[in-house]
């Protein structure tokens, strides 16, 4: 065991899911789906093919909130396929 949760603490999987849900409050309506939380990470997957165009300033701001939180994304204007997970190439969002 590395750490014990104290009253008010949130486990890493719950925290990852909460962050993903805050980023994508209506996955179906936004053409996305959230994967099951595991090891403090949730992937946000596209249900449609297209281009990924992140807001770099907002991602940077989120990543500056706390060093224990990292939002990693695909590169700007990366082509995405519907329902494709390619962990070997880092093609996912991490919470």
Image: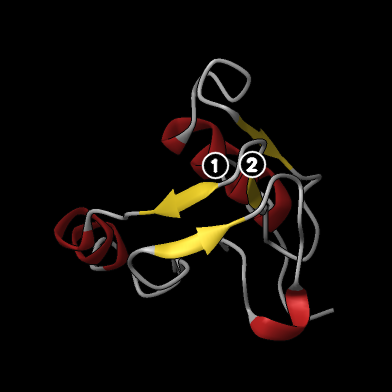
Q: Position of residue 86 (x, y in %)?
A: 75, 71
Q: Residues within 10 Å of mark 1 (few under 14, many from 20)?
A: many
Residue drawn at (50%, 47%) of the image: 50
Front residue of 86/15: it is 86
Residue drawn at (23%, 54%) of the image: 55
**Apparent side of residue 3 relative to residue 20 in the rendered image (left or right):** right
Most distant residue in the left direction: 57
- The image quarter containing residue 71 is bottom left
Front residue of 34/67: it is 34
Residue drawn at (76%, 45%) of the image: 35
- What residue does disc 2 label? 17
Tag 2 and tag 1, C-beta contact below 8 Å: yes
Front residue of 81/42: it is 81
**Apparent side of residue 6 relative to residue 29 in the rendered image (left or right):** right
Residue 10 visible from this viewpoint: no
Q: Quadrant of the N terminus?
A: bottom right
Residue 91 visible from this viewpoint: yes
- What residue does disc 1 label? 20
Q: Secondary structure at mark 1?
A: helix
């Amino acid at each position: 065991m590395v750490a014990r949760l104290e009253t008010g603490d949130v486990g890493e999987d719950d925290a990852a899911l909460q962050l993903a849900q805050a980023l994508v409050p209506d996955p179906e309506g936004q053409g996305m789906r959230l994967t099951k939380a595991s090891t403090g990470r949730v992937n946000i997957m596209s249900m449609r093919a297209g281009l990924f165009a992140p807001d770099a300033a907002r991602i940077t701001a989120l990543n500056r909130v706390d060093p224990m939180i990292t939002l990693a994304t695909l590169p700007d204007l990366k082509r995405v396929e519907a329902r494709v997970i390619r962990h070997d190439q880092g093609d996912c969002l991490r919470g």
